[in-house]
Image (spheres, helix red, strand yellow):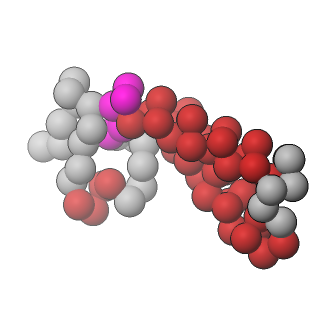
Amino acid sequence: MIKNIGTMDRSLRVVIGLFIVLLIVKSIVTGTAAIILGIFAGVFIITSSLGTCPLYIPFKIFTNKKEKAE
């Protein structure tokens, strides 16, 4: 699997994901919005932990400096 997420991108995804989770846990966001944002939070945290964003692959976007597609 190609690692296409850099350190800053990964950190930002984790912060955003945890912020969304906090909003849901504190019941600031509820209902359908909480479900949708919860899915986004999960995607942000999972892609950050894997270091790969599937949406970046077709557009050949790399936010890391070490590995580039050939």
Is residue 50 in view?
A: no
Does 21 sit above or below residue 58? above
Q: Residue extending furthest bottom?
A: 32
The residue at 20%/27% (across/down) is: 65
Point out residue 66 in the picture as x, y percentages from the top left corner. Answer: 22, 24
Q: Position of residue 21 (x, y in %)?
A: 74, 46
Furthest toward the left, the residue is 70
Magenta region, residue range: 4-8
In depth, the one of 57 and 36 nearer the eye is: 36
Q: Position of residue 12 (x, y in %)?
A: 47, 36
Q: Residue at x 67, y 61 (%)?
A: 37
Res. 53 in view = yes
Residue 57 lies in quadrant: bottom left
Question: Residue 24 colored magenta?
Answer: no
Q: Is residue 42 above or below residue 45?
A: below
Q: Residue at (68%, 49%) from the top-left corner?
A: 20
Give coordinates of residue 26: x percent, y percent: 86, 47
- Residue 20 falls left or right of residue 64: right
Dominant secondary-structure state across the stretch colored magenta: loop
Looking at the rendered structure, the number of numbered marks drawn on it comes to: 0
| Horizontal side of residue 29 vs 56, given as left or right | right
Farthest front residue in view: 28
State which quarter of the image contains the N terminus: top left
Q: In which quadrant is the C terminus drawn?
A: top left
Asked whether residue 5 is drawn in magenta, I would say: yes
For residue 36, side relative to residue 52 (left or right): right
Residue sitting nearer the eye, 18 or 27: 27
Residue depicted at 72% across the width and 57% down the height: 38
